[in-house]
Image: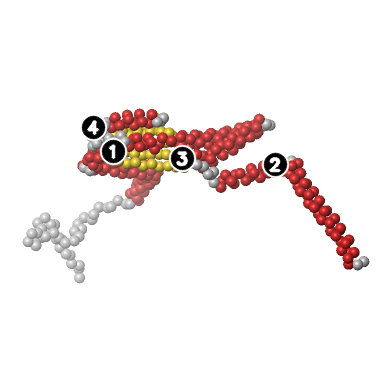
Amino acid sequence: MSVREGRRRGVPLMAVGLVAVLLAGGCGAGGSNGGRGTAAEAPAGGAAERDQAAPGQAGAGAPDLRVDQRSIIYTGTMQVQVDDVERAARDAIATVTAAGGFVGGDQRRSEAADARAELELRVPAAKFTAVIDELAKLGRQQRREVHTQDVTEETIDLDARITSQRARVENARKLLDRAGSISELVSLEGELAKREADLASLEAKKRRLGDLTTLSTITVTFVGPDASTAEEKTEIGFLVGLRGGWEVFLASMTVLLTVLGALLPWLVALGVPLVLLVRVWRRHRRRRTPPAGPAPVGAPPVGPLPTGPLGGPSPTAPPPVPATRSAP
């Protein structure tokens, strides 16, 4: 066979091989597409993978919400000096009521020299800034503090936990319906009660957060024109020192009585037996000690004789006993 004839035969064989490769590729692609369309386990497996991936994605961070979609708690405190405390308090309540809020607390002191009113006002979050500005216009603002707390992530987490806990409660109820024995029934009832209590606690937290984010809190204090002078007068003086000393004395007595009350049981438990033992020991010692005998008659006094004012013998001193000589 010549080289030219071999080349002629090789061209058809290469064409047939190329067609076979193309057909095999097309069949493989069709089979893979058909497998995705007909396999019953593929959707379930994908859903399971999505369910497993969802908690991880939720834990990675809160969704990127706009400012108006975030849950923010606004709280403000301010002090305003006014000419008439009662009138300023009435105007503040009227302003809050017109904004759709209400009064949460009201404390007033009506002394002429030191009039004072402290109001806790709840206003819608959307009108927080406008209301606090209106309150500042009622007099001369002396202090203002505004704080914000973003609880968006906590709210989202509570929603997820509430949903999960509700599912757990439903599962416990289903298991309770299929209980086959008294012991199993009692155990499932306890588990159901625990899950329902956890769910109620989560829902209470969610309501509390919702209340704080929906209604902001403003604590405003109205003071009279003489409030600063009255405060300076009451900061120093004899009565202030006396009151402070009395408070320190009461605190010290409280601590002393507390310590005494803590030690009293030990003193009773240990002191009474100790006193009894000391008394018994003393009686026993007295019984064992012999009584002292009478002094010998005619025995010379021991020690030097008392002397008179001029160095002689004292007139009250007893006469000296003459020394006796022994016989030679």
Residue 202 spot, x, y in % from top left: 53, 36
According to the picture, the residue beneath numbered tag 3 turns out to be 72
Of badges 4 and 1, nearer the viewer stands 1
According to the picture, the residue beneath numbered tag 4 turns out to be 112
- Along the line of sight, the residue nearer the viewer: 268 or 89: 89
Query: Secondary structure under badge 2?
Result: helix
Q: Measuring 53% from the left and 44% from the top, which residue is drawn there?
A: 64
Of badges 2 and 4, nearer the viewer stands 2
Residue 322 spot, x, y in % from top left: 15, 63
Q: Are marks 3 and 1 in contact (CB under 8 Å)?
A: no
Mark pair 2, 1: CA separation: 68 Å
Q: Is residue 134 placed above or below 252 in the rendered structure?
A: above
Q: In the displayed image of the protein, which residue is found farthest to the bottom?
A: 328
**Horizontal arrangement in the rendering, residue 194 relative to residue 249 (left or right):** right
Give the amino acid type for the residue marked by disc 3 in the picture: Ile
Instruction: Check residue 140 in the rendering and tell me which mark sits there, or answer none.
Output: 1
